[in-house]
Amino acid sequence: MTDATDPSPSSSWHLSDIRELAHLLTLALPAAVEITEAVHQAVLSGMGLKGRDEGKTAGITGLVYKGVHGTANTLGSGINHLLNRLPATPPPHQIPETPKRAALIATLNGVLGDKLVEHHNALATPMTLRYQGKPLDWQAMPKDLPREGRVLLMIHGLCMNDLQWQTEHQGKPVNHGEQLAAALGYLPLYLRYNSGLPIAQNGQQLALLLEQLLAHWPGELKEITIMGYSMGGLVARSACHHASVAGLTWPAHLANLIFLGTPHHGAPLEHAGHWLEQLLPATAYSEPFVRLARLRSAGIKDLRHGKVIDEVAQPDPAAPLRDPRVPLPLPCSVNCYAIAATTAAKRSLLADRLIGDGLVPLRSALGQHNEARHQLAFLPAHTLIIYRTSHMALLANPQVGQQLLRWLSPLQL
C-alpha cells in the first residue's frame, strides 16, 4: 500500500483535473446567479413589487439579471471553448497518483460525489477493490494471492480514500489493517469508493464486488473480515443486507465485522444540515439559501440517521419524532465488534449524547438507540470505548490495534 506520507509534487492537480473542475464551475455559475436573483426578488416582494415568475425579478432589475445570466453563460461557453483548445490530456484515472491528489479528489467526491456522477465528471471515483495500492483486475489477478485466502477488507469513511488508513502515532507509522494482517495472517484488501453517493447504492455495489472477488479468487476464499471506519461501517452493513436480499454467496464466508467510529444512528453535523434545510424556507428571504443546504451530497445526507437501506418506515402520526428508518439488525452468524471514542475523560449523559468523538456520539457508535427496534445487539465483550480520543485519532490509537488483535486472535475465534 502507498504510504500517505510520501513526498508529492508542489501542485497536486493535473491539467486533466483542472479541466474537470472547470466544467464544474461552468455548471455552478448559472446556479449562483439564480440564487442571487431569488434573494433580490424576495426583498422586492417584501416591498410589494412582483416579479416575472417565482424567484425572477421584473423590469429594469430583470433586464440586468438577464444580462448577468447571459454573461455567466457566455463565460461558461468561453471556459469550455478554452478547454477544448488545450492539448489533449489523459483521463484523471490514468494520471500517476500521489497521496495529496488522492485526498483532494476524495474530499471532492464526499461533498459533491453524486453531482459528479450525474454530470459524468471524470473526477467521480469508481468503486474498486485494491491490493497493494492498485485496483484488482478480474482478468489478471495478482499471482501472489494465496490459494486459501483469509481477507481483511478495509473500508474508509466520508471524504477519504484507502491511502488514509496509513497514518502516524508519535512519529511512527500506523495502519491497523496491515498490523492485523502481519500478526494473524490476513491478506489486506482496501475499498475505494465515492462517499458522496447514497450509502445504500455503495452497499449494493460492494455486495456485487465481493461476489466477484469470491468467483475470481485463484483458490478458495476461506474467510472475509471487514473493518469499516466511520461511514465505511454503514457501507459494510448495507452490503450485507443487499447480499442477503440478492441471495449472494459471499456472506457465508464473512466471519467478522469491525465498526470503528461508525455513526450507526447518525451524526450531529448532518442533523444540523437537515435542520438548516427544514428551517430556512420559513421566510421568503431565506428560502433561496435552501438550495445551498441541499448541495451537500446524498452520502452526507444519509449520515443524518445512519441510513443504510432505501426502505423507509410508514410515518406514525402519533409519533412524529420516531426514527423513519426500517430497522436493520446486525447480520446473524457474524462476530460484530464496535469501537467508539469520546473526547471526554469519563462517561456522562453529555459525553454520550453530545460530545462523543467530536463527530459521532458515543451511543451512535455503540449502536444504542432509544427505540428497541433500532438497538444493535453488540455483545458487551465486543465493544470498546476509548477516552480522550477524537474521531480521526482512532486511526492511529494504539489501544485500537491492541484490542483488534485480542478480538481476532485464533483463541478468541
Image (cartoon, rainbow, N blue to C red):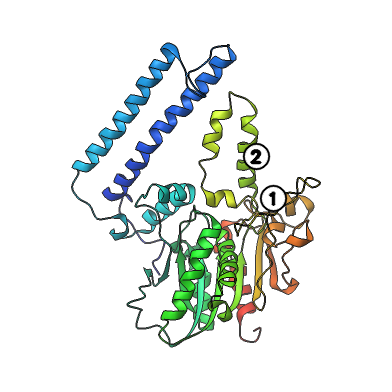
* Image-based side of 374 in relation to 311, left or right: right
At numbered mark 1, what does the secondary structure look like: helix, strand or loop? helix
Q: Is residue 322 visible?
A: yes
Q: Quadrant of the C terminus?
A: bottom right
* Nearest the eye: 277 or 228: 277
Mark 1 to mark 2: distance in Å?
A: 19 Å
Residue 74: x and y in percent read 29, 29
Q: Please name the amino acid that badge 1 sits on.
A: Ile
How many numbered marks, from 0 up?
A: 2
Residue 81: x and y in percent read 23, 37
The residue positioned 35% from the left and 44% from the top of the image is: 21
Residue 24: x and y in percent read 37, 42
Q: Please name the amino acid that badge 2 sits on.
A: Trp
Residue under numbered circle 1: 355
| Image-quadrant location for residue 163 | bottom left
On screen, residue 381 above or below 238? below
Q: Which is more N-terminal, label 2 or label 1?
A: 2
The residue positioned 51% from the left and 69% from the top of the image is: 207
The residue positioned 55% from the left and 38% from the top of the image is: 293
Q: Is residue 14 visible?
A: no
Mark 1 nearby-residue class (10 Å; few <14, some 14–19, many ≥20): many
Mark 2 nearby-residue class (10 Å; few <14, some 14–19, many ≥20): few
| Image-quadrant location for residue 271 | top right
Residue 204: x and y in percent read 52, 64
Residue under numbered circle 2: 275
At numbered mark 2, what does the secondary structure look like: helix, strand or loop? helix
* Image-based side of 18 in relation to 371, left or right: left
Identify the residue at the far right of this view.
318
On screen, residue 385 above or below 33? below
Q: Nearer the viewer, mark 1 or mark 2?
A: 2
* Nearest the eye: 332 or 21: 332
